[in-house]
Image (cartoon, helix red, strand yellow):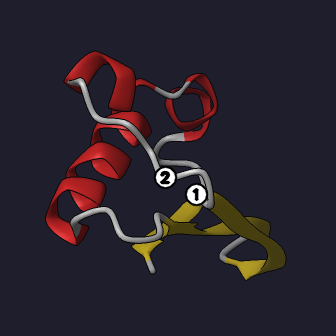
Amino acid sequence: MAGKAGVTLPEDTHINSEVSIGPIDGGFGIAVKLAVSVGDLDKDTAHSLVEQAHQVCPYSNATRGNIKVELSVI
């Protein structure tokens, strides 16, 4: 999404992920936390790019509504 928007990501950009499993009604469920670190990139721009990426990501599309996802920009 950054390339499409003409935004160059800082070299130190990285994503920390955490996947957990826990009880839900009728069984167990999965939850995912993604913390995107974008160095000195403007945080509003970063939030927008992360949200856009979440909308087109094949994993997000495959699991949307089935798992809890928490996105953050740090």
The structure residue drawn at horizontal position 21% and vertical position 25%, both measured from the top left corner, is 5
**Left or right of residue 44, residue 36 in this image:** right
Q: CA distance from mark 2 to mark 1?
A: 6 Å
Secondary structure, mark 2, is: loop
Give the camera-side residue of 34 and 3.
3
The picture places residue 35, in percent across and down from the top left corner, at 56, 72
Which numbered marker is on residue 47?
Answer: none
State which quadrant residue 73 falls in.
bottom left
Amino acid marked by disc 1: Thr
Q: Residue at x 73, y 67 (%)?
A: 17
Q: Is residue 5 visible?
A: yes
Residue 13 numbered mark, or none: 1
Name the residue: 30% across, 48% down: 51
Circle 1 sits in a helix, a strand or a loop, which is it?
loop
| Left or right for 66, reference 53 | right
Q: Quadrant of the N terminus?
A: top left
Three-letter residue code for mark 2: Pro
Q: Quadrant of residue 62?
A: top right
- Report the residue marked by disc 2: 10
Residue count near mark 1 (Cα–Cα under 10 Å), binned few <14, some 14–19, many ≥20? few
Q: Residue at x 58, y 49 (%)?
A: 66
Q: Establish if 22 lies above or below 26.
A: below
